[in-house]
Image: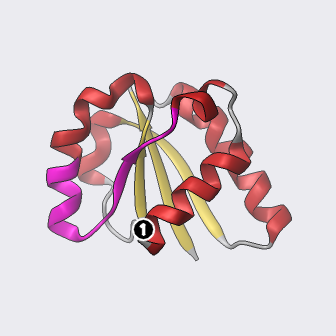
Amino acid sequence: MVNIYLFCAGGMSTSILATKMKKTAELKGIEAEIKAFAVSQISKKLDNLDVALLGPQIRFRLPAAKKLCDEKGIPVAIIPSVDYGMMNGEKVLEFALKQITH
C-alpha cells in the first residue's frame, strides 16, 4: 500500500485530482491511498506517508513543506502544472510513484 497525499491552498482542487488518481491506481492494480488536504494540514498528515505533492499554485510553500518532510524522509514535489491543469490522474500518479523510487 502506497500513501500519496496532495496538498493545495484549500484541498478542493486537489480532491478532484486525487479521485482521478485513485481510479487510475485501481485500473492498474496499484494499492494506494490517495487523499487531498489543505497545505495548512501538512504537519499533521505525515505519519505513514510515502510522498507529498503540492499543487503548482502553492509552489512558494515548497521550502517549508520540504523541511517538514525531510525530517521524516518523505519526498515532496510540485505537481507538474500541465498535468495539474488537465487533471491528468494517470500522469500525476506516475509522477508520484517516481518520487518514491528516487
Q: Residues within 10 Å of mark 1 (few under 14, many from 20)?
A: many
Going by the numbered disc 1, the residue's amino acid type is: Asp
Relative vertical location of residue 23 with respect to residue 80 in this rendering, above or below? below
> Is residue 31 left or right of 45 when viewed as pictured?
right
Residue sitting at x 47%, y 31% = 11
**Part of the protein shown in magenta:** 66-80
Q: Quadrant of the C terminus?
A: bottom left
Q: Which quadrant of the structure image shows residue 84?
A: top right
Residue under circle 1? 50
Residue, far right: 27
Secondary structure of the residue carrying numbered label 1: loop
Residue sitting at x 45%, y 69% = 100
Relative vertical location of residue 46 with respect to residue 36 in this rendering, above or below? below
Relative vertical location of residue 80 with respect to residue 2 in this rendering, above or below? above
Rendering coords of residue 92 (x, y %): 61, 47
Residue 10 appears in view: no
Rendering coords of residue 10 (x, y %): 42, 25
Residue 60 appears in view: yes
Q: Which quadrant of the structure image shows residue 61?
A: top left
Q: Quadrant of the N terminus?
A: bottom right
> Is residue 1 left or right of 50 when viewed as pictured?
right
Residue 67: in magenta span: yes
Nearest the viewer among 54 and 102 is 102
Residue sitting at x 31%, y 65% = 74
Rendering coords of residue 93 (x, y %): 63, 54
Q: Which quadrant of the structure image shows residue 51?
A: bottom left
Residue sitting at x 19%, y 62% = 70
> Is residue 18 left or right of 73 when viewed as pictured?
right
Nearest the viewer among 94 and 7 is 94
Residue 29: in magenta span: no
Nearest the viewer among 91 and 24 is 91
